[in-house]
Amino acid sequence: MAVSIFVGIAGVLVALVLWVRFAPVRANLAGRLATAFAAALLVSACATQIDAGVSSGADVPGFWWGLWHGFVFPWAWIGSLFSPEIAVYAVPNTGAWYDFGFFLGVTVLGGGSFFGSKKRRN
């Protein structure tokens, strides 16, 4: 908790310094990127995960289950609207590896990055 507060305060200070530093040239790309990075740092400082959500063992979902859960996310989400027994995200899981698999499943296997980058032909 203390680390999260420290990172949050550091993010605010970095955002303020960058805002003042790039105030005259805010339209500049470097200024925009630095401000966006500082804002992302500030927001990410608030993110925490409870210890009960991360586990280890043979029966705990890892990368491959995260990949599968990310791929079936659209259907699981629709099912979760009608049944409280259907979840879109497994808890507890292995943590970062499960999250990475879930992210890849949603974006790559689910078509998130493919369909958004397709160019239309006239």
Image (cartoon, helix red, strand yellow):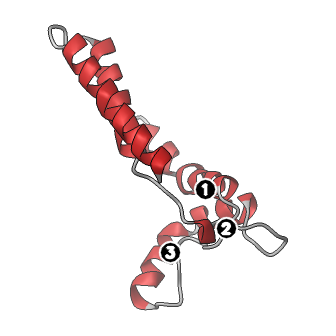
Q: Which callout, 1 or 3, points at the residue further toward the start of the chain?
A: 3
Looking at the picture, tell me which residue is in the foreground, 113 or 119.
113
Where residue 91 appears, as percent x and y from the top left, is: 60, 73
* Residue that badge 3 annotates: 75
Q: Tag 3, which secondary structure?
A: helix
Q: Looking at the image, do the residues carrying marks 2 and 1 touch, with CB atoms under 8 Å apart?
A: yes
Q: Nearer the viewer, mark 2 or mark 3?
A: 2
Residue 30 lies, with reference to residue 50, above or below; the image says above
For image coordinates 52% across by 68% down, the residue present is: 73
**Contact? badges 1 and 3 (CB < 8 Å):** no
Residue type, mark 1 in image: Asp
Label 1 to label 3: alpha-carbon separation: 18 Å
Which residue is tagged 1?
99
Q: In the picture, residue 16 is in which quadrant? A: top left
Three-letter amino acid code at the position of disc 2: Asn
Q: Which residue is mark 2?
A: 93
Q: Secondary structure under badge 1?
A: helix
Query: Distance from label 2 to label 3 (Cα)?
Result: 20 Å
Element under disc 2: loop
Mark 2 vs mark 3: which is more N-terminal? Answer: 3
